[in-house]
Image (cartoon, rainbow, N blue to C red):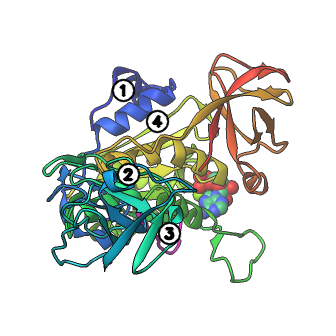
Amino acid sequence: MTAGPASDVAAAGGSLSTVEAYQSAILSAISPLTPVSLELADAEGCVLAEDVTAAVALPPFDNSGMDGYAVLAADVAGAAQDAPATLQVTGEIAAGDTGAYRLAPGTAIRIMTGARLPAGADAVVPVEWTDGGTSQVKVRQPAEPGNAVRYVGGDAAKGETLLSAGTRMRPMQIAVAASAGRKAVTVRPRPRVVVLSTGDELTEPGTPLVPGRIWDSNSYMIAACAREAGAVACRRSVVPDDAAGVLPALEEQLARADLLITTGGVSMGGEHDVVKAALRELGTVTFRKVAMQPGMPQGFGVIGDDKVPIFTLPGNPVSAYVSFQMFVRPAIAALQGTDDLSLPSVQATLAAPVRSPSGRRSYLRAVLDGTRVTPLSGQGSHQIAYLGRANALVIVPEQETGLSAGETVDVVVLP
Ligand code: AMP
Ligand code: MG
């Protein structure tokens, strides 16, 4: 992978990489997935790899914008509450009626919303302006020419680009593509993400704990994070801290993954950090320290013949969560050829003082309420209980060792 000078230095020596340098090293190493053609029903959450143009003008014909009567505006020009214009009703056109109708001057045709405007008519009088008559109608208000008429091409011209390549297919965009006549679209698919927790201490939730063990939360959390970011994600059973078993366990997943994520086994503890040990031997994954808290030990690279990107996130649940949002989330967008997943950042007033290590950017779990942000009291990387209460992360810049209540801070709003 290619990396900027700052992260090269960090990777080589003991110095820390900045969050931004690490992010750009990751993005420069990710290639977007190959586009595929998907039917509209399967394209939700995918990113267009082509422009979508209108197959016909929209709307494709002049039609009524309301339920009412198709008329010649001149025939109702003098209509008033106490002096209604009375017109003969000669027929009715419902939406979907493909017949060719013609309005004779001095008459009206009952018409429904979306029905094709008859030739000879130039306005629609809403039913609310009339007595609703069926053989004859009294119109109590004049209608300008064009009133309640939706003209051909008034929405879009034939051939007009309605959606540009790079647009994510959310429900509105799916509606646009369907309205443009498309059955399928060429998109970059949702990345397939496989998540593996590592650690001898991990037990499946739902099975009894014995002393020395904890329940695995990371794989469920990170798979959910990936899904929230638009990926198709699954977790696999826990990988034990067995140096010989890690690489085969990862390689087994390669066929079904566009991105692999592990948690645990990458800190500084030596022989128990089996993920780091196993991947280091490959030479395609770089481990570094990033100037942040939580989430300092990070690993990223590629694995297998297809060079599948792999993140090795730290094991503490809060570290894994923050690392996902800062580094994996943008990588998922990059696999779809976009950068539209960045989390919103707002400014807010700090409700309580905070501390932060010098030289590292802190991301503190907090509750954001309007323009006021309250840091949660338990900021340990293992304190998952507090993660459940947070809706935001307060950023304390690298050079600050503390901030006072009342100061303005940048806050990342969590999805
Ligand atoms: P490690 O990065 O493997 O040294 O783990 C750091 C800390 O995170 C340890 O306290 C682990 O028990 C904890 N941890 C690691 N993986 C998980 C997991 N999947 N779920 C919950 N806690 C974990
Ligand atoms: Mg571990």
Expressed as whole percent of the image width and height from the top left, the position of residue 67 reads: 43, 68
- The residues colored magenta run 231-240
Residue at screen point 51% across, 75% down:
237
Expressed as whole percent of the image width and height from the top left, the position of residue 391 reads: 70, 47
Main SS of the magenta segment? Answer: loop
How far apart are labels 2 and 4 at the CA level?
A: 67 Å
Q: Which amino acid type corresponds to the residue marked 1 in the rendered image?
A: Asp
Residue 239 marker: 3
Q: Are marks 3 and 2 in contact (CB under 8 Å)?
A: no
Residue at screen point 15% across, 58% down:
56
Expressed as whole percent of the image width and height from the top left, the position of residue 407 reads: 79, 20
Expressed as whole percent of the image width and height from the top left, the position of residue 229 reads: 47, 55
**Left or right: 226, with 386 as reference point:** left
Residue 8 marker: 1
Q: Quadrant of residue 119?
A: bottom left
Point out the frontmost of discs 2 and 1.
Answer: 2
Reading the image, the residue beneath label 2 is: 147
Quadrant of the image where one finds ligand 2 = bottom right
**Left or right: 152, with 396 as reference point:** left
Of the two numbered discs 4 and 1 on the same chain, state the one appearing first in sequence.
1
Callout 4 crowding tier (Cα within 10 Å): few <14, some 14–19, many ≥20: many
Of the two numbered discs 3 and 2 on the same chain, state the one appearing first in sequence.
2
Of the two numbered discs 3 and 1 on the same chain, state the one appearing first in sequence.
1
